[in-house]
Amino acid sequence: MTAVPSVTLNDGTSIPQLGFGVWQVPADQAESVVAQALETGYRHIDTAAIYGNEEGVGAAIASSGIAREDLYVTTKLWVSDFKAGRTKEALAESLQKLRLDYVDLYLIHWPSPEDEKYLQAWAAMEELQSEGLTRSIGVSNFLPEHLDRVAQTGSVTPAVNQVEIHPALQQRDIQQANSKYGIATQAWSPLAQGAVFGDEPIVAAAEAHGVTPAQVVIRWHLQRGRILFPKSVTPDRIRENFDVFGFELTEAELDAIDGLERDERTGMHPATFNPR
């Protein structure tokens, strides 16, 4: 089985750099899709309460026969829960659905910054970590100003900031802020939902290495040091996205892909997205 590189987080734990995401995977498909990913070799699964598929993820894990210590499981705290002061209850519900005693990483899903209640949520997250219900705690979609506020008020630095990053949206200001605090950058929508597959530097690199555009973009993330978790429900694509360790992009190819930045989002902007 291919050995996936690990990234050491600022709390001393390690996380597989390449994982498998289940955003938009229907609840009734989650078990079979995650089972396929685990069979392929993925050991890092990223889900969230709002995805509605934690039960399927938990069922796949339970039937996999893989030792718990060999798996890395992330889930996320939704906005309505932390705004209602239910951070601890929300994790308890997620753990029940996942059939786990703890998760490896628990994230605040969005800052929803209109009232800064994410700071109260962070204090509760610190308690959950101290209680052993999550090994690491982090954030998702936090802008530099949100990271600054957590640093000013919290006693634990987030281990991870999970944000939208792909060749067309590289969010260098966030990556720099993450580095400032020793926070690992994790990319969601790492393939831009395929929107960058026709861009010339990616096509050229794919042809040069005899791989697909998706594999090129995954290698670009890996070689730039980011954690990522591409998603697919198609067995061939699940395997293809994992088969990225037999080639390396040149520095010129990496630089050319870096040059594709065009501030093109596939999701919402964290400064203005205040879900309920």
Image (cartoon, rainbow, N blue to C red):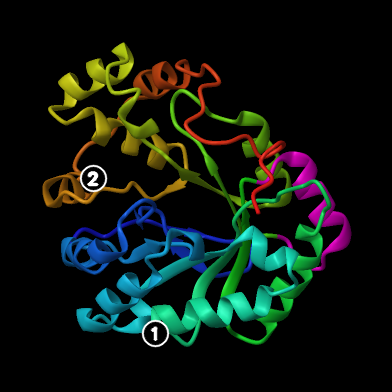
- Inspect the magenta stretch and tell me whether residue 70 lies in it: no
Q: From the top left corner, tell me how far across and down residue 160 is, in percent.
A: 59, 56
Q: Which residue is mark 1?
A: 99
- Inspect the magenta stretch and tell me whether residue 145 lies in it: yes
Q: From the top left corner, tell me how far across and down residue 175 is, in percent.
A: 62, 38
Give me the residue at 59% from left, 56% from top: 109
Q: From the top left corner, tell me how far across and down residue 17 is, in percent.
A: 40, 54
Q: Amino acid at mark 2?
A: Asn
Q: Please, is residue 205 above or below residue 125 in the view?
A: above
- Mark 2 vs 1: CB contact within 8 A: no
How many circles with numbers are drawn on the protein?
A: 2
The label nearer to you, 2 versus 1, is: 1
Q: Which residue is mark 2?
A: 241
Q: CA distance from mark 2 to mark 1?
A: 27 Å
Left or right of 121 in this view: 17 = left
- Of the pair 161 and 31, the residue shown nearer to us: 31
Callout 1: helix, strand or loop? Answer: loop
Callout 2: helix, strand or loop? Answer: helix
Give me the residue at 65% from left, 54% from top: 276
Determine crowd level at label 2: few under 14, some 14-19, many 20+ residues with C-alpha closer than 10 A: many
What quarter of the picture does the N terminus occupy?
A: bottom left
Q: Amino acid at mark 1?
A: Arg
Q: Residue furthest front?
A: 276
Give me the residue at 80% from left, 61% from top: 119
Q: Which residues are magenta?
A: 142-157
Q: Please, is residue 238 above or below residue 67 in the view?
A: above
Q: Main secondary structure of the magenta part?
A: helix
Q: Can residue 276 be seen at all in this image of the molecule?
A: yes
Quadrant hosting residue 124: bottom right
Question: Mark 2 vs mark 1: which is more N-terminal?
Answer: 1
- Of the pair 99 and 156, the residue shown nearer to us: 99
